[in-house]
Amino acid sequence: MAAAASFWLAEHPAIVGFRWSPTHLWFSTWAFLLGFLASYVALCLVLDAFLAAALRRRKPLPLGPVPAAHALLMAAVSAVIFAGTLLSAAAEIRDTRWSWRGRSRTTPFRWLLCFPPGTRSSGRVFFWSYAYYLSRYLHAARGVFAVLRRRRGASARVFAHAASVAMAFLWLEFSQSFQVLAILASTLAHAVAFGFRFWVGAGLPAARAARGAPVALACQLALLGCNLACHVGVVWMHFGAVGGGCSGIGAWVFNTLLNGALLWVFLHCYGKRGVCDDDGGATAARVTGSSGSSKEL
């Protein structure tokens, strides 16, 4: 079983021989990326304006089981990408460790944070980076759900999803350092958070009791902490610890600016009275009235 999983997730010829190419892969050109981002943001803004004009009250549109089904799909996709990235990173370290001896001070940990200059977007880990990039388009549907459900802060979430697509593209286009750790942290957090959302959205046993658990908030905080630590590590290695610097440092600077904007989105969404989830649901914030009953914000 383990050998089969290792083959299909790390040793398959399509994975080992992967190469990022704007002419042979779907959604791999700058024109498509910019066109999608413009269309996605415009669609959400127009949809939000239409619903605001058509509905006097902030009444959400019923989406039925669609958000729960989407959460299940995202949880499954994230789990597969996490497993594939983990096995592929281990395989790359195993296959290239010999080339580090005597020529540089590179170690597996340093490689995870700082790709050597001249690294090309090819091989196992970049196959899963491409899979992660494609999954960002699927993830962007959460922004549309937030608009349709007329949730506060929906525009900020639309921006966050658009920025996530752009960042994943930059990782591949410029062979950006630290993306392996970023993908591992992100997919693990998404697998847990979306699995929980499906559990609650589908009304599975004990879901009502767990509805107020701050699972999404905990995953967001853990992901932000991991990203911050990785950024500090890249700065340390690029400017001192590793001779020659790190691959994709220019894209990393832009990535850092986008991460700062995403941090603002996080504070905007969670720093208020209600704690909002990706699908707009209140997750953990409750207040207790004078009668002692609790009410979701």
Image (cartoon, helix red, strand yellow):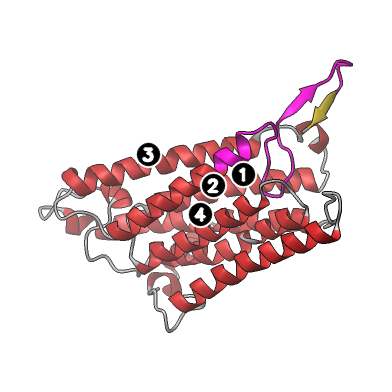
**Contact, CB < 8 Å: mark 1 with mark 4?**
no
Cα separation between marks 1 and 4: 14 Å
* Residue 88: percent from left, percent from top: 41, 59
* The disc label shown at residue 20, or none: none
* The disc label shown at residue 83, or none: 4
Residue 278 on the magenta segment? yes
Q: Return the residue at label 2.
A: 188
Cα separation between marks 4 and 2: 9 Å
In the image, taking residue 106 as reference, residue 198 lies left or right, namely: right
Cα separation between marks 2 and 3: 17 Å
Q: Return the residue at label 1.
A: 192
Q: Which residues are magenta?
A: 266-293
Q: Return the residue at label 3.
A: 229
Instruction: Nearest to the eye among marks 2 and 3: give it.
Output: 3
Q: Residue at x 42, y 44 (%)?
A: 227
- Report helix, strand or loop for mark 3: helix
Instruction: Nearest to the eye among marks 1 and 4: give it.
Output: 1
Q: Quadrant of the C terminus?
A: top right
Q: Residue at x 82, y 56 (%)?
A: 65
Q: Nearer the viewer, residue 154 or 73?
A: 154
Q: Residues within 10 Å of mark 3 (few under 14, many from 20)?
A: few
Q: Mark 4: which amino acid?
A: Ala
Earlier sequence position, callout 1 versus callout 3:
1
